[in-house]
Image (cartoon, rainbow, N blue to C red):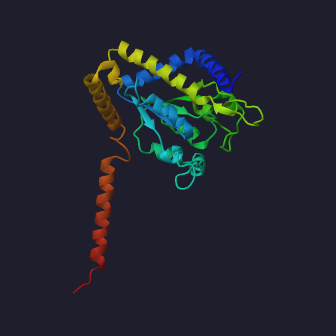
Amino acid sequence: MSPSADYLKRCATLLKTVASQQSAIQKAADWFAETILRGRMVHCFGSGHSRILVEEMWPRYGSFPGFNPIVELSLSFHNLVVGANGQRQAMFLENVSGLAERILRNYDLSPLDSALVISSSGCNRVPIEMAEEFQKRGVRVVAILSRLHSEASRSAREDGRKLQDFSDLVLDTGAPVGDAMVPIPDLDTPVSPGSTVGGCLLVNSIKAEVALRLTAAGAPPRVLTAAALVGKDRARDLFEAAYDEHAHRLAKLYERVGPPRNSVGTSAKKNVSVANTRRRRSAPRG
């Protein structure tokens, strides 16, 4: 069997793994649709190459508003490889404790929200802590990972806990240990990973189920659609409407970020008063 044929055969096993998880896919879709129907967002996070699945969910053709893609360039900007913004730095930052909390500090989260956290190994600190921080705020977490790879890998956390330990629902890409699937004669390490294939099957299965639920509820999604399918004018209108809806939903996540305005104002007034008092005390007396 040629390597390409071998790879495609192994991808067929990924399809079977995803197909066997219909119950979990349906549950994830229920949660996500509920969030979107309530005017909130599904927060999608992935570091490293897992960002591919975040962008697969939204925004691209065949996708729709309701998903908040959280992609940190410092964790996923791979094309330079070395030098400034290189892969070594990204892999280092992926295991810096506390970074997840700083990322989520930007958003006013609600228990009405839901989250999708993606990590093939489920063992790097930032994805694990993202799930942990979501759960602390009452947000339900769906994880996408490779069970085989995760079970064979060691968590970067001292307590040994992994992404699945902070998830309400776990979906398996079916990728093997190490991700790469194809052995090559006289080469001691395999090539051609499978987690992206399995992950894309999962997110698009969920996406289709969410679209069904939104439409059945009388709120059909505004789907990014190619002009070749619906014509130039209709495609443009759909894109504009979808992006506007995304902006409006995202705005809600910034409305109450940080302490209440009144407390900030009171604190600022107090600081000004203290500063004025000090000036008066230090002013020379004639």
Please provide percent x and percent y for residue 151. 70, 31
Q: Quadrant of the N terminus?
A: top right
* Residue 94 can be seen, yes or no: yes
Q: Nearer the viewer, residue 11 or 152?
A: 11
Q: Is residue 279 left or right of residue 142?
A: left
Q: Nearer the viewer, residue 219 or 237?
A: 237
Instruction: Answer with the quarter of the image where residue 181 lies.
Output: top right
Measured as percent of width and height from the top left, residue 166 is found at: 58, 33
Q: Is residue 89 above or below residue 219?
A: below
> Residue at the spot x=57%, y=52% of the render?
82
Q: Residue at x 34, y 32 (%)?
A: 246
* Quadrant that contains the C terminus: bottom left
Total marks placed: 0
Location of residue 135 with respect to 231 vertically, above or below = below
Q: List the single residue furthest toward the bottom.
A: 286
Residue 5 in the figure: left or right of residue 73: right
Q: Is residue 102 left or right of residue 192?
A: left
Residue at the farthest front position: 2
Q: In the image, residue 117 lies at what x, y percent? A: 53, 33
Residue 12, quarter of picture: top right
Q: Nearer the viewer, residue 181 or 243?
A: 181
What residue sits 44% from the left and 35% below the top? 69
Left or right, 282 with respect to 153, comes to: left
User: Who's the residue at 69% across and 24% down the image?
Assistant: 2
- Asked whether residue 138 appears in the rendered view, the answer is no
